[in-house]
Amino acid sequence: MDERPVNGGYGGHERQGGFGPHNLKALADIVGREYCRSHPVDLESYSYDSSPFIYSPAAVVIPGTIEEMAQVVSLCRRHGWPLTCRGAGTSLSGGAVARLGGVMLSTTRLNRLVEIDPLEETVLVECGLVNLELQKALAPLGYMYPPDPASQKASTLGGNVAENAGGIKGVKYGITKHHVLGLELILDDGSLVRTGALKRGLEFNEPDLTGIFLASEGTLALVARALLRITPLPAAFRTMSVVFDSLRDAGQAVASIIGEGIIPTALEIMDKRLIAALEDYLRLGFPAGAEAMLLIEIDGLGPELDAQLARLKEVCFKAGAVSLAEAESEADREKLWLARRSGNGAMGRLKPGSLVQDVTVPISSLPAMLAEVQGIADRHGIVIVQMAHAGDGNLHPHILFDPADPLEYARCLKASADIFAAALRHGGTITGEHGIGLEKVDFMAVEFTEAELGLMAAVKSGMDPTGILNPGKVLPRKWQPRRGKGHNG
Amino acid sequence: MQGYGDIYRCTRCGFCQSVCPTYLHSLDEAQVARGRVHLTRLLLEGKYDFTKDREVAGKVDACLLCGACVAACPAEVRTDDIMVAARSDFAANRGLRLFHRLVYGGLLSRQERLARVSALLRLYERTGARGLLYGKTLRRALSRLVYFDSFLPGGLSRPARAGLGQALRPAGKPRIKVAYFLGCASNVFWAPTVRASVAYLLSRGAEVSFPPTGCCGEPHRGAGDLEGARALGLGNSGLIFRGEFEAIVTDCPTCARALRRYDWFVGADSREGERVRGLAGKVMELNSFVAERLGIPAGGLRPVGHGRVTYHDPCHAVRGLGVREAPRAILSAIPGLGLAELDGADSCCGGAGAYGFTHPAMSGRIAAGKAARIARGGADLVSTSCPACALQLGAGLKRAGHPLPVRHPVGLLAASAGLCPGGGEP
């Protein structure tokens, strides 16, 4: 990656060549003039996501129907224009920026909740529906959609599917791929196809094609609608925060909890810098000087929870817990989770730039990995703030930098590489839920063999032979299909 | 260039999308706090230019300054203040927008002219001019004017200040001496509410004076005219200091918040800044003053002829001053009146000072959304504590075909106490 840090990020900041009026008219004819943008100032707003990568598209379209969306895809294919699909733009790995310019398709207007079917426990949604809006619609009916990425206030379900988003409840309820029953997809030529079922009870014993689109990051096809599985809301919760003297102790407690066979709803680790930043934001009364904290939640019917809680406390103290506090009210509980979800945004209090890593290791390696990341930070002389969905071994080290200091940024990239290497050494993976995007492309060849990459490349070439869909993402250049026509029409 | 504070704290996490009214009504990233902050960074870094990039100025101008993003931001990036800083740098380089020069500089800074405009508006309401607008042919041609006309409540009365001269004394010995800071919009559009509020304050033993203050200066500041705001801040604070007041009360939360922050207006580090900081502690928004300082006596109140009220939180009250409970306590004290919480009560109505006039399309969309939620809630009365919100809500409800009265809580309380039957009704 040779880009230069700019504006809290890095990337080819200059425009990638505009679209001629003729081409813009073709796009505007599909979505309407109001929803087709090409002024450079308008394009700025679609040049970023929540990652440090910034690339401007040549045009932005915001279709109002699935049919319009399909027509845009078809037009791009005919002209060979690169096409990047974007929901809320909360990708942490550069998944939603237009690396090669071309058309940016925003799904925000495709936000209908088509159907809630409590009998079958499913919902049919359009791709642009915001995760939290779905939760709000389900809660009065006594249901939830379990995958709850920290970005759920903004992130869209189409984006969640394309990135196979995880979430805080992942340890008990699984991640997005465990909740998708079927997809309506737009293929690279604009045709609409279905995989799985869009109505429960209509599943056939066909090859499970749905799976390959989870975490495909918009490189194989675009998600138009999805049939998702919903789950009854638990009747009762217990939530507590536990303070430890070191991250390693907290990691040990996590390993012991899982080892004991307790499955909490959520099991989150936060380090001292994050605790301080969140305290600064929300004033929760976290103990000053706490080195590490574990947020633990269990849920269920109610009566069994007290016994589980007692066991959890015992395990934590055995692992070296210093103190322990239970959330006393629903408001307390919500505040704790608001704190955890705000972790990413709150990093802005510490430094203006951050790279968020997403490595995942087996639980038994978690204590060692947490300590190793701290060691990497010290070795490179940089600041790494650690948080983790500890229950499934998913670490989120936030590597902080000042975009005005290119040397510091270079050290951060080296530290990133060291973290990836360490995760792989522990038998882990370089991404648990944030996706490969642009950020981790170079490390694909480290994690996967030639044969494995070849399989992925074959799927990509089969689905998108001209390489127009989210080009430059996921697969290293060598494995990308050769682009059919020239850039930008 | 200053005032950009913590602009580099934005990590583009996108949480502002869930609350930014212009985003929620456009679903367009160019209309969200994160996008505005991003563009402002590009201005500071020199990619765009304060002297010539009109389109960027347009994006900066399109912010409501409602502060919802600030409350939702994990890094507490103060997008509202950052937008003001950018507007002032645009103004310094390109001059103020014509609208702001004419209305803020030309009218609000010159109160004597404001009274004349009020007279013209009343004339317009009462002559046939208004009826003409609704004629079929003209209606289409003048749809914009019809939109603006919807803001006039009908039966506009003389400005409040015209009837209020010297200090008004309560019946017995005064409990407390109060300066009533009369804002421009309250003066012109909300005179009955002002009179009802003053009547209530007097009935509760307050001595009420009306220092001849001008505009609070917040419209100027919001438009980036920091010099205009500073001049008004200095002038007003001098007038208020001259009297021995225990409290400075205003029915307009925008004025109240401005008065509280006058040290910013005049320069926080200056000698004047030091002086006006002493003022801040005395400033109280009307609801808080009534509910918390004076107290609401339980007896002597009677129904006001409405059954179900819903309350809209003005941005500058709920986020600017932290006023949430006081107006609800007042409404709940009125017998026979049930308070139905409004879905999204604290999201901006799109009034935002003169936003309805500078950005009618977006403002109208936001108002329509608010009106639809009010209609769904089934209230037969709307209450809010800001004259601009009241105009905007009244107009939005009227355009939605669901006209409802909009009243200040203290106006209703005065009606309930039998002090003025209309409760601030024109």
Image: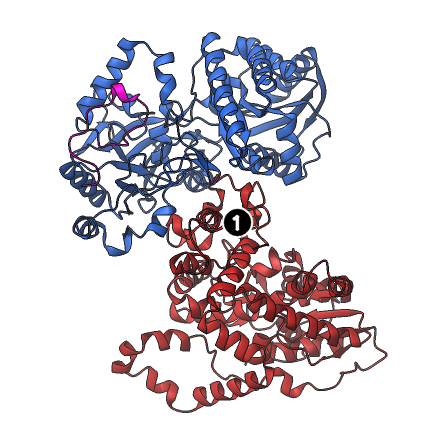
Chain colours: A blue, B red
Magenta segment includes A85: no
Question: Quick check: can you spot residue A484?
Answer: yes
Quadrant in the picture for residue B206:
bottom right
Q: Which residue is denoted by mark 1 in the rendering?
A: B69
- At mark 1, the secondary structure is helix
Q: Residue A425 versus residue B317: which sits nearer the camera?
A: A425
Quadrant in the picture for residue A219:
top left
Amino acid type at circle 1 is: Cys
The segment highlighted magenta reads A468-489
Which x, y percent locates residue A462? 17, 22
Q: Main secondary structure of the magenta part?
A: loop
- Image quarter hosting the C terminus of chain A: top left
Q: Residue A72 versus residue B426: which sits nearer the camera?
A: A72
On screen, residue A192 versus residue B411, left or right, reads left
Badge 1, how many Cα within 10 Å: few under 14, some, many 20+? many
Question: Quick check: can you spot residue A120?
Answer: no
Which x, y percent locates residue A310? 66, 17
- Residue depicted at x 21% and y 37%: A487
When the figure is inspected, residue A446 is found, relative to residue B281, above or below; the finding is above
